């Protein structure tokens, strides 16, 4: 518990800086965790009557720091980035705060105040995400902000820290439950009626249930109602469905964890904008993939005006990712210790790599890449699973090492990492990742 106390004390120091500010400039990362981090903080600032300006970016850049230096803001806070980029952050001549959960290479030299769970013995890859850090700060600004746990939970889910929730995340959700804004029930982690939901699902992905017709036939055979929401099905039907879906996942090669994770805690949230935390995560991600960051942020501030539009974006994205998934087996390239696959649409690469390594081919890390011909660059998402991590794989190390060799940039977490590098080094990069991962596995 000492570690959590230390982390909370540090969060309070950042909260004090923020409440003493006349204006706050917030910079956050473009995924669900980053956007909910900003949503939690902006709501807390709004409640205190402190004006703010938020920008969502993929990473800190020199261009961004130059822009910020020309603005009049006195306090700048970075979420979900910064711990590994002191060279860029230090160019800002304002009071800079950093709240990041990525494994840090640096400590005090990063910013005026730096909040990183790894400095306090808390694992930022599994026990708290940037949204959780934002929640800790908001809670220190005003205890009324405990209701923002429901938004921060959507961030933790975005970074897949909910399977199961641990540490700070668990405490945050219990505060949300006490506050009446989160309800936890055990059920199938699929939201909606079976015929519409199962063919579109990617978490998990059911390779042989990719059409509504196939699901209807299956449900008819099992005598399961088709119209009802999955978690409202009669117990007997639910049990039959779980058993059948689990067997299908097993047959297609899914790892044990994706099968057991089919059933688990389902988090419903109160006070909008949608009924389930996981749904909020997916809608925020859908807006972010379309670079509609304003819409994504408004969802993360519990606004419901853009829910329908976000659902449209999600439908569009689901079609694209399901198309990519339907040909992943034929496109994938085998290397000694990794698999690589090219995608046609850049925003699908993270999900494609993650679904492939969890639901189809779990025995090697998967690198999904997009060739950006305009920029003459390759952009890669690498994903592993818990079993591979236990065997010693660290994709963050492998990707940053290979990016160094290929003259690019890379990093992230042991289980989920990314990189970009010049196109003419395409194969050099994969060869180096394969070499590093092989040595991590001792093969
Ligand atoms: O882009 P993607 O979702 O694959 O990124 C996975 C992780 O890798 C994220 O935590 C991201 O911040 C990190 N990343 C990085 N450097 C890059 C690309 C991604 O550190 N060039």
Image (cartoon, helix red, strand yellow):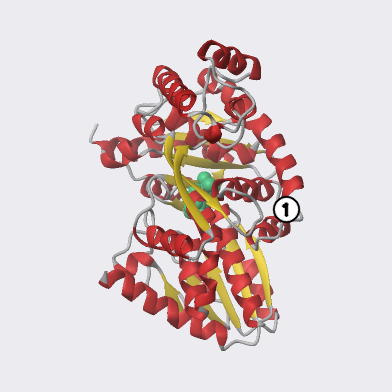
Between 89 and 162, which is closer to the camera in this rendering? 162
Query: Does residue 194 appear in the picture of this structure?
Result: yes
Q: Residue at x 44, y 50 (%)?
A: 404
Q: Residue at x 63, y 41 (%)?
A: 347
Q: Residue 250, image x and y in percent?
A: 39, 21
Look at the numbered disc 1 and give the secondary structure of its residue: loop
In the rendered image, the vertical position of residue 336 relative to residue 393, given as above or below = above
Disc 1 crowd rating (10 Å Cα; few below 14, some 14-19, many 20+) is: some
Q: Residue 123, image x and y in percent?
A: 33, 59
Query: Does residue 109 appear in the picture of this structure?
Result: no
Q: Residue at x 37, y 79 (%)?
A: 9
Image position of 243 (left or right of 77): left
Image position of 172 (left or right of 220): left
Q: Residue at x 37, y 57 (%)?
A: 127
Q: Residue 271, image x and y in percent?
A: 62, 60
Image quadrant where one finds the C terminus: top left
Between 276 and 388, which is closer to the camera in this rendering? 276
Image position of 78 (left or right of 175): right
Image quadrant where one finds the N terminus: bottom left
Between 45 and 439, which is closer to the camera in this rendering? 45
The image quadrant of residue 39 is bottom right
Q: Residue at label 1?
A: 292
Q: Residue 231, image x and y in percent?
A: 53, 35
């Amino acid at each position: 518990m000492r570690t959590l106390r230390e982390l909370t004390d540090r969060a309070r120091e950042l909260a004090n800086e923020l409440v003493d500010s006349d204006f706050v400039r917030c910079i956050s990362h473009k995924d669900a965790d980053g956007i909910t981090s900003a949503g939690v903080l902006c709501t807390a600032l709004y409640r205190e009557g402190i004006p703010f300006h938020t920008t969502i970016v993929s990473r800190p850049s020199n261009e961004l720091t130059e822009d910020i230096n020309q603005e009049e803001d006195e306090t700048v806070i970075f979420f979900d980035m910064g711990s590994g980029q002191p060279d860029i952050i230090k160019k800002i001549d304002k009071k800079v705060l950093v709240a990041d959960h990525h494994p840090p290479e640096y400590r005090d030299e990063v910013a005026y105040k730096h909040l990183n769970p790894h400095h306090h013995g808390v694992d930022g890859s599994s026990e708290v995400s940037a949204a959780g850090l934002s929640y800790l700060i908001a809670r220190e600004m005003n205890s009324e902000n405990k209701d923002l746990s429901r938004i921060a939970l959507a961030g933790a889910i975005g970074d897949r820290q909910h399977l199961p929730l641990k540490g700070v995340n668990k405490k945050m959700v219990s505060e949300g439950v006490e506050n009446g804004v989160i309800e936890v029930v055990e059920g199938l982690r699929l939201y909606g009626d079976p015929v519409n939901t199962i063919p579109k699902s990617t978490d998990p992905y059911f390779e042989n249930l990719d059409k509504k017709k196939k699901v209807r036939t299956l449900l008819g055979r099992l005598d399961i109602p088709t119209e009802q929401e999955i978690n409202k099905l009669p117990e007997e039907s639910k049990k039959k469905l779980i058993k059948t879906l689990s067997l299908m996942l097993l047959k297609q090669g899914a790892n044990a964890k994706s099968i057991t994770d089919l059933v688990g805690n389902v988090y419903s949230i109160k006070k909008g904008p949608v009924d389930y935390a996981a749904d909020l995560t997916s809608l925020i991600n859908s807006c972010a993939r379309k670079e509609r960051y304003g819409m994504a942020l408004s969802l993360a501030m519990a606004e419901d005006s853009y829910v329908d539009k976000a659902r449209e974006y999600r439908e569009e994205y689901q079609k694209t990712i399901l198309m990519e998934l339907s040909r992943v087996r034929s496109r994938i390239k085998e290397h000694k210790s990794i698999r690589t696959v090219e995608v046609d649409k850049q925003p699908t690469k993270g999900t494609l790599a993650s679904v492939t390594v969890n639901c189809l081919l779990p025995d090697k890390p998967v690198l999904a890449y997009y060739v950006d011909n305009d920029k003459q660059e390759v952009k890669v998402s690498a994903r592993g699973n818990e079993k591979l991590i236990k065997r010693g794989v660290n994709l963050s190390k492998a990707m940053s090492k290979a990016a160094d060799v290929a003259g690019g940039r890379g990093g992230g977490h042991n289980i989920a990492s990314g990189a970009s590098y010049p196109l003419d080094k395409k194969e050099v990069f994969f060869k180096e990742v394969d070499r590093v991962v092989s040595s991590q596995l001792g093969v």
